[in-house]
Image: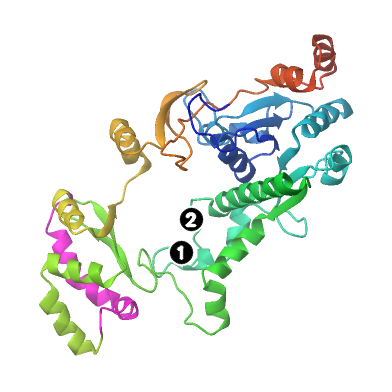
Amino acid sequence: MTPAGMSAPLEGLRVVELSGYVATPLCGMTLAQLGADVVRVEPIGGQADRSRWPLGPSGTSLYWTGLNKGKRAVEVDFRSDEGRAVIADLVERRGVVVANADLPGLSYEKLRERRKDLIHALLTGRRDGGTAVDYTVNAETGLPAVTGPAGEAGPVNHVLPAWDIAAGLYLATGLLAAERHRLLTGEGRRITVALRDVALSMVANLGYLADAQLGGEPRTKDGNHFYGGYGRDFRTADGRRVMLVVLTSRHWSDLLALTGLTAAVEAVERALGADFRRDSDRYAHRAVIGGLLEPWFAGRPFAEVDAALSARRLLYAPYRTFEELAADPDALLAGNPVLGMLDQPGVGPHLSAGSPVVVDGEQGPPRPAPSVGQHTGEVLREELGYSAARLAALRDQGAIG
């Protein structure tokens, strides 16, 4: 439930979430952080991803609590007829469900028999129903072949589950589009997002497929260089590393003025027959440009580099480890309202995040993730009218937790 006084554009939207791992929990949390009441239904004992790394000192999954903040939790036996009947009752009552599997007796067709205006949002691995996860999808995209240091022979995976994240946000977008359609027409919708389709669409949207199809120069691994323009990392005198990106002619001229290289670079341009005001020429001669810039960075400590680049409003950032980023929580909290201290049961006080969406100048604070079955009795009693006797009977049968 949304804290009092916070702007909540999705207040009144009630969602049943039947999901696990990254994409669908992120969809549900995205909606919850904007005011929707999301009830996550899990198997008895909790979904398998409740133990996924990283873990807190107590063994509580920081991953799971991070992706399920602000939801309520109901614990049901998915394998029993009685348990599935409880889930169907809840979906019928709420009218919106997001899932990452078509469970027996809980398919769109079965649930729609009970509520004609049902909104059913389903994440699949592949469009044909085949299985896939972020790591297997990414292997097919071609990106691992161009990720990593120059000269690295094998594919290199990136750490961020980018396709899961994009799929979760696409799923939320599709669900909200269906909700708008229902508000206008009274009709429900079936929404399906395939993880592999998300990856293929973005590889196409970014021009990578077209470039290969139309005979562009084959991409190779190029370390931290910015493809097609100028950008790379530099080491400072005190061993810090800084990523610098040049996007505009103003960035380029200001960088040269700052480093005192304007005349030297003009001489190199004449010798090479190049024009470094153009992205393509800067990229083609990136090694030469890097050789000119490296001494300026190497001769100054990070504090001086930081102040100079900041004064010129150039695009740069220091590289940090997770540990370095988390080392000064007060600074992060002071400068970034999306973050807050959250006292999560089983974890304790730690830095966490609310929604990055700012609504009327407001951002809600992060709210705890629920424990297994924390709201089972509350939800079934208040929303479905189950009596104490019925709840007790279902618990005796093992249908609910």
Label 1's element? loop
- The image quadrant where one finds the N terminus is top right
Q: Label 1 crowding class (10 Å Cα cut-off): few <14, some 14-19, many 20+? A: many
Number of callouts in the render? 2
Choose the circle earlier in sequence order: 1 or 2.
1
Please say if the residues under marks 1 and 2 sit with CB atoms less than 8 Å apart: yes
User: In what quadrant of the picture does the C terminus appear?
Assistant: top right
- Comparing 216 with 74, the one in front is 74
Q: In the rendering, at what x and y percent does residue 9 appear?
A: 56, 38
State the residue in front, 309 or 267. 309
Q: Overall secondary structure of the magenta stretch?
A: helix
Q: Which segment did they paint magenta?
A: 275-302
| Image side of residue 297 versus residue 216, left or right | left
Identify the residue at image location x=21%, y=51%: 239
Q: Position of residue 21 (x, y in %)?
A: 62, 41
- Which label is found at residue 158? 2
Image-based side of 257 in relation to 77, left or right: left
Q: Secondary structure at mark 2?
A: loop
Q: Residue furthest front?
A: 184
Answer with the quarter of the image where residue 221 lies.
Answer: bottom left
Mark 1 = which residue?
A: 147
In the figure, 148 relative to 186: above or below?
below
Determine if the magenta segment contains residue 296. yes
Q: Position of residue 38 (x, y in %)?
A: 64, 32
Which residue is situated farthest in the top direction here? 389
Distance (Cα) linking label 1 and label 2? 7 Å
Q: Left of 90 or right of it: where is 349? A: left
At a point 62% along the width and 59% down the height, the residue shown is 198
Give, as a three-letter code, the residue at label 2: His
Q: Is residue 94 visible?
A: yes
Task: Where is residue 35? Give x, y as percent.
Answer: 57, 33
